[in-house]
Amino acid sequence: MKRQENTEQEILRAAEQEFIEKGFSGAKTTAIAQRAGVNHAMIHYYFRTKENLFNRLFEEKIKILTANLYPAFFNKNIPLIERLKKGIASHFDFIAENPGLPRLVVNEIISNPARREFFRNKIKIAITMLCGEMQTELDRLAKDKQICPIKAEDLLLDVVSLNLTIFIIHPLIEGILYSDHKKFIEQRKQENINIILSRLNYRL
């Protein structure tokens, strides 16, 4: 069983590299098999089709992201502002660990309407739950004059757009706006947190 799990993970890692470099249409299962160090029949055995392999890869990424975000956003023992800081940072760190993923998703959404629906269906439940839980607390803090009134949907869009954009445009600005990648990423993460909290009119 362990060996089987390892083989699946190796194929998924190889598929991620292939999809990010070449997109879904340009990726070849033969190339994925070669990257993973397995024969082509193993791709068919575990995933049947390239479509299934792509969908499984995205589902795995959603699970990882959810596992990172939910403890940050839903821990009621921590004040909402602190949870927002942790949530924004966790989302940013996830993208930093998967920097090619945003460009892959955007390209697939634009070029493949069917894929767009797949992505929408996967994230709809998570977004609905997150916004519903957060709105109650946002309204309470706004009523107490601790923050400005804001819709949870707008707050979530602010977080996603700020965190995603830097990695989507990264190939254009690398070496132009900064030279130290690690330092830049950490500074950008903190800047995004500051921007979001400033939007809430929360004093840092």
Image (tube, helix red, strand yellow):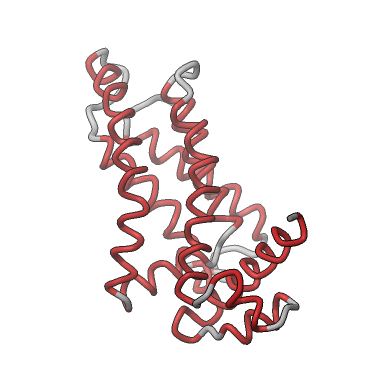
| Depth check, front residue: 151 or 64 | 64
Q: Position of residue 133 (x, y in %)?
A: 32, 28
Residue 175 appears in the figure: no
Residue at horizontal 60 percent and vertical 69 percent from the top = 46
Residue at horizontal 60 percent and vertical 48 percent from the top = 186
Q: Position of residue 87 (x, y in %)?
A: 48, 37
| Depth check, front residue: 64 or 166 | 64
| Depth check, front residue: 148 or 86 | 86
Q: Is residue 114 above or below residue 155?
A: below
Q: Is residue 184 above or below residue 25?
A: above
Q: Is residue 155 left or right of residue 70?
A: left
Residue 159 image-quadrant placement: top left
Residue at horizontal 48 percent and vertical 52 percent from the top = 62
- How many marks overall? 0
Q: Is residue 38 above or below residue 131?
A: below
Residue at horizontal 26 percent and vertical 42 percent from the top = 154
Q: Dividing the image into 4 quarters, which one contains the N terminus?
A: bottom right
Q: Is residue 137 left or right of residue 66?
A: left
Residue 6 image-quadrant placement: bottom right
Q: Position of residue 86 (x, y in %)?
A: 52, 33
Residue 29 appears in the figure: yes
Q: Is residue 100 above or below residue 159?
A: below
Q: Position of residue 8 (x, y in %)?
A: 66, 64
